[in-house]
Amino acid sequence: MSATPAPRRRLPAPWLCALTLCAFALQTDDFVITGVLPALARGLTVSQAAAGQLVTVFSVVCAVAAPIAAVGTARLPRRRLLTTALALFCVANFAVLPTSSYAALMALRVLAALAAAVALPAVLAVTAQLAPPERRGRSLATVMAGLTGAVVIGVPAGTWTGAALGWRATFALGGVLGLAALLLLRVTLPPLPPVPAASLTARLRPLSRPAVLVTLLAAVVAVLGNLLLQTYLAPFLYDLCGITATTLGWLLVLTGVAGISGARAGGTLVDRWGAGAAFATAAAVFAAATAGLALCGALRPAPLGFVAPLLVIWAAAAWAVPPAVQTRVLALAGPEHGPQALALTSSAVYAGASLGGALGGRLLASHGTGALPVAAACCAPAALLLFATAGRRPSDGPSETETSEAGTSEAGTSPA
């Protein structure tokens, strides 16, 4: 009797590959500065704290502009919107090559952030619109792999490019990625009509529920604690271990892989224990890892063999937070406001990133790199207190356990 042949694995559609590449390019551009921060600061003759504000500005613009752009561009055809936004993104990155002014680079980062704020929500909407209903979840997960892949591949690649060719080449790499995504989208993406979009008032309506607002504040504080260290990881590790740019690139690969594993583990903990216990576990591990890094800072120079495992634990714990936050927000907001609440969660992440970059810059300028992990460790209990407070507030939405599965599946669609 002949064996039944195994079903052939379906390859992703060309338009899905294009959208995934678009997400990869946008997310790489968001965080790539962290790998070239010292060289960029030297090249522009500014402090590393000032250079870190380039990350802050990018995150602030994305947090504020994304929900507004989603409403303001709802009537535009999707392909034209995406290609226009990507063209603007490419111009903003390639224009860095002749730039020698900090103010000019700051303006270009604002331009790139505006393009990203328009493009990324559209990428997700188009994916959901084009994917067959039975493959919608897998298609969204494929696009989100572009976001996580940016952490594992894009940011280290930008770091190595900057080390070999100078920090401006890192932005040129972002422009090349954006151009490749633009061309692939033009060839593969079919014409699509605009889709109805909720008004800005509807998008902000979940904030009228105090428990949702407190949960989002917990997310802001948690991400703040992560990004105030991550933004200035290069100067911190240089002072701690004297690492080179090449070694930093490999460490970013390692922490990126750890982050992806942490996100998956966070989703599993939500399913098994609930959002409250999952968040508490992630916060406790994060605090322990950053406290260990703070101890290394006090005893520097520290051996890389001791620091690297702490970095892995820190990254995994930081990425384990979003599944718990999104599950709790979905439960508190209710199914009728779920999409709007999750959009606000993304804005909370960007807000925390911007505040983390700003606070980290002040700490770096006034107290040195050793203050960064100390402050990061202090953010964890504050975030946990806010999250626990939100869990004790009454809600007229469904219970947390009723939406934990849905929340976990959505959690994989948003990076920490």
Image (cartoon, rainbow, N blue to C red):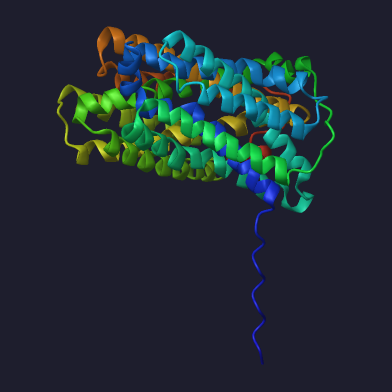
In this picture, residue 158 sits left or right of residue 192:
left
Furthest residue to the bottom? Answer: 1
The quadrant in which residue 398 appears is top right
Q: Residue at x 66, y 89 (%)?
A: 2
The quadrant in which residue 200 appears is top right
Placement of 393 over or under 24, stated as above or below: above
Quarter of the image that includes the N terminus: bottom right
Relative depth, front residue between 119 and 306: 119
Q: Position of residue 40 (x, y in %)?
A: 35, 20
Q: Position of residue 122 (x, y in %)?
A: 70, 31
Q: Residue at x 66, y 54 (%)?
A: 12
Q: Position of residue 180 (x, y in %)?
A: 59, 40
In this picture, residue 247 sits left or right of residue 109:
left
Placement of 406 over or under 231, stated as above or below: below
Placement of 132 over or under 391, stated as above or below: below
Relative depth, front residue between 339 and 232: 232
From where the camera sits, is residue 413 visible? no
The quadrant in which residue 157 appears is top left
Relative depth, front residue between 227 and 205: 227
From where the camera sits, is residue 104 visible? yes
